[in-house]
Amino acid sequence: MKKFENHPPVHTAILERFYRLKSSKRLAHAYLFIGPKGIGKSETALAVARLLNCEKETPVGEACDCPSCRKIDCGNHPDMYRIKRPEDKSTIPVELFRDVIERLQLRPIEARVRVCLVEDVDEVRAEAGNVFLKTLEEPRADTLLILTTSVPEAVLKTVVSRCHQVFFFPLSDRELADWLQIEYHESSSEAGEAAKAVILAKLSRGSPGRAKDLGLEFLQEKNEIIDCFILSPRLEDAFLKSYTSDKETARKFLEVLLTFFRDVALVKRGLGEAALIHADRAGDLKKLASRYTEADLAGIVAEIVSAMRGIKENMNVKVAVTLLKEMI
């Protein structure tokens, strides 16, 4: 993985695939990048744009300071288009497509291959999708379209059918931990900091974007949840209110509970620390594993999953969490 400051890493294997397609002149006109949010789809798409237009033919995975690469990095290349949903909109407006489509019909200003990146194409509705279809079907030979999505089921079928699909898979815990140590400027020689990066990587389920959203400070927060909710004999009103005040906070709270009790179940079955997310709480996990039966743990996990589902259905999370505490 190549490291880009403040961005998820570029997927080098996919970049190498595009290099081979370019070299063999088998590059298609449209690709759909599919993978979890924050996995690095857009960053890899921009790396593809740099690869196809690099003036120095820099090897895959190496940084380049040629004018073309610099312009793409800075977002001011005249032949690099990026379409995404505005923050104040619920979908990608059709006007954005109409504006770009007019430009795509002209020759590139300076690029060998003009690239149009449409992020989160699942947020495109029928009208905008239909406007974009003709461009997807018959783009200029010097134009490459890259679309991204984390919800392929929500992408218009007519759009999917006109693209070659490229799948992005979560990083391994080790890959993500290594990237986090670089991103947070943590020395790999410091065992404690390296352990934090591994825990955050596991909590992030292989997604660099999710890891950055959580941040290293979340490790202290997750331990507070374990101490004040799971291990404490009482549930304080202030604590309950702070973690059920909004959906996002409640979701993170329940995810900590879910991963923790899954770890307890793994310890119950005799698995070692390498398999655990909360390896820093190994002592507590062992104590709880001796307290609960496997049936107890299955019931607790099912209740947590039910509460997480309730968040999506606007159920009273506070009530669900209170009932969960009684089970624990």
Image (cartoon, rainbow, N blue to C red):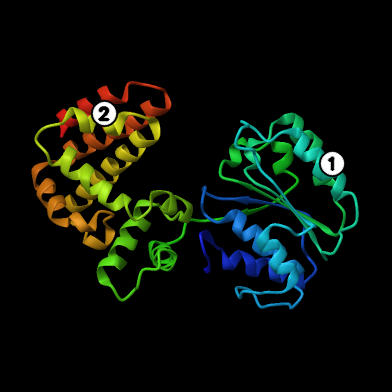
* Residue at the spot 64% in from the left edge and 38% down from the top edge: 86
Residue 309 appears in view: yes
What residue would you read off at disc 1? 134
Mark 2 residue element:
helix
Badge number at residue 241? 2
Residue 311 on image: x %, y %: 38, 28
* Residue at the spot 86% in from the left edge and 48% down from the top edge: 103
Question: For the C terminus, which image quadrant?
Answer: top left
From the viewer's perspective, is 291 left or right of 192?
left
Residue 128 on image: x %, y %: 75, 34
Badge number at residue 215? none
Q: Cβ–Cβ below 8 Å for labels 2 and 1?
A: no
Mark 2 and mark 1: Cα distance apart in space: 52 Å
Question: The residue under label 2 is which amino acid type?
Answer: Lys
From the viewer's perspective, is 179 left or right of 216?
right
Residue found at the very far right of the displayed protein: 106
Q: Residues within 10 Å of mark 1 (few under 14, many from 20)?
A: few
Residue 304 on image: x %, y %: 28, 34
Rendered image quadrant of residue 41: bottom right
* Residue at the spot 80% in from the left edge and 45% down from the top edge: 100
Say above or below: 79 vs 301. below
Say above or below: 236 vs 165. above
Q: Going from the N terminus, do you reach mark 2 or mark 1 first? A: 1
Residue 232 on image: x %, y %: 11, 39
Residue 138 appears in view: no
Mark 1 residue element:
helix
Question: The residue under label 1 is which amino acid type?
Answer: Lys
